[in-house]
Image (cartoon, helix red, strand yellow):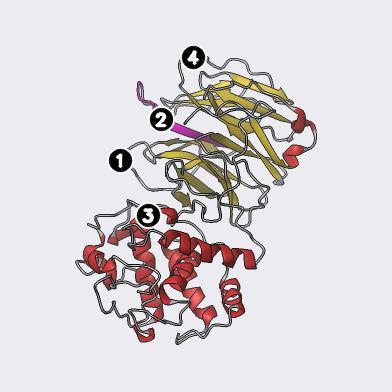
Amino acid sequence: MHRFGSVLLCLLVGLTAAVVPLGPSGEPPAPAGAAATDYPSVTIMGPARLSADQIAAYYASLHKSPKIPVSMKQLAQYYLDEGAAENVRGDLAFAQSALETGWFEFAGSMVNPGDYNYAGIGACDTCNSGTGFPSPQLGIRAQVQWLRNYADPTSRVANLHRPSMWTVAKYDNFFLKGKSPLWNTMGNGYWATSTTYAEKVLNIYQRMLTFHGLGFSDVRPSNPTLSGGRSVALNPSGGYYVLDADGAVLAFDGAPDYGSPHWGWDAARDLAVMPDGKGYIVLDAWGGLHRFGSARSGAIAGLKTPYWRGWSIARSLAVTPSGQGLVVLDGWGGLHARGDAPRPTGSPYWAGWDIARSVTVAPGGGYYVLDGWGGVHESGGAPSLGPGPYWPRWDIARDLVVTAGGWAVLDGFGGVHARGGLTGPGNIGWMPSDYWRSIATAGGRWVAVRKDGYLFTR
């Protein structure tokens, strides 16, 4: 364990909305700039943003003398490979190790370079040493698998890609399993006792990203009480986006970042990507539309929809294939179409009952509306999709996706109910309560997000 943190894994492995004033535009104002010590909300699970070459190039710029038996590029590749195997962010695991080992120079560390222990596993405040591993890759494998155990409540030895002997013994019964899905909540008893552990790891990661011109624009100042996923959307040119509860739009897998609103409260409701892949629109809880990139120009830039000041009733947003129209769904089922979006006809309206959950534009025109019980309703001439899942008197349906090849409903427990020839993604991570919020698919790619920010990608 390096002097910067106090690791608890000796115990874990050894035992083996407030009312917000409106801005001049009538929409929630952006918050004040974050303090320098505020760091973004980043999930432990998910894809890396940096390649092995990029990690090695950043490390070379520091002019350190790492005490490792392989090249820095090879070490970085171990993090990415082991991370990809367990859907853990390997580049952030590298940043954690940089903190734990003093940039792999091991000055003041409780472990020796020959232990190949780059995460302080087995070290603690009252210990004199940590666990030793046969090779760097096996040490990194154990680190990554324990990170997954903190983040993923469904983690089990049986679903590890390559179970390690250093994780098997206490893995399934880990008492902190799934308790820390965000890097922001690490420390304070999660992995380390240090109250600034997460901040230091994320600071290192921020510098790694900035070195390569990526910045930190896909994350936002942390607030664990607000953190969580609201919506996911695929970019037609590649990559995907996650909308966080406070408005932050997180860009992944090369999706271009066009900015995002930032509120200090649970204000965000949905995200719709422009058909050209060069912009998107964020829908807030009161019906406000926040445009970025190509959504700021053309016909769609001037479209106005109802705004329910102080009333959290907006639920879902969809953009037409031309990029010149949009439709907003309110909680009572009202469809508010603008631009070249067709006039809504035939869809139900539940006055006084907040039960509408999602709207999508039908491939051939018109709309589909999902209610909380799982009912799918056609509007504007969209053809019937046929029978699907339905849970009478149980508000558990959360999102709907419709493609030319079929459709699927996501329930809050993580069930993906595919119909009409669409092949579902399989087990995305069952939860024992209402956690899952949004799902998207295109070209065989599936992305889903939970309310705690956990991501599923396949």
Residue 227 visible in the displayed image? yes
N-terminal-most mark, 4 or 2: 4
Q: Residue at x 64, y 26 (%)?
A: 327
N-terminal-most mark, 4 or 1: 4
Alpha carbon distance from label 3 to label 1:
15 Å
Q: Are marks 4 and 1 in contact (CB under 8 Å)?
A: no
- Structural crowding at the residue carrying mark 3, measured as other residues with C-alpha within 10 Å and reported as few (<14), some (14–19) or many (≥20): many
N-terminal-most mark, 3 or 2: 3
- On the picture, is 271 further left or further right than 196? right
Farthest left residue? 15
Check residue 398 for magenta coloring: yes
Looking at the rendered structure, the kind of residue marked 1 is: Pro
Looking at the rendered structure, the kind of residue marked 2 is: Pro
| Numbered disc 2: secondary structure | loop
N-terminal-most mark, 2 or 1: 2
Q: Nearer the viewer, residue 412 or 150?
A: 150
N-terminal-most mark, 3 or 1: 3
Q: Nearer the viewer, residue 166 or 236?
A: 166
Say the numbered circle drawn on residue 389: 2
Residue 160 x, y percent position in the rendering: 34, 62
Farthest right residue? 298
Residue at the disc numbered 1: 432
* Quadrant in the rendering for residue 308: top right
Instruction: Give, as a single range, the part of the protein colored magenta.
Output: 393-402
Residue at the disc numbered 4: 350
| Numbered disc 1: secondary structure | loop
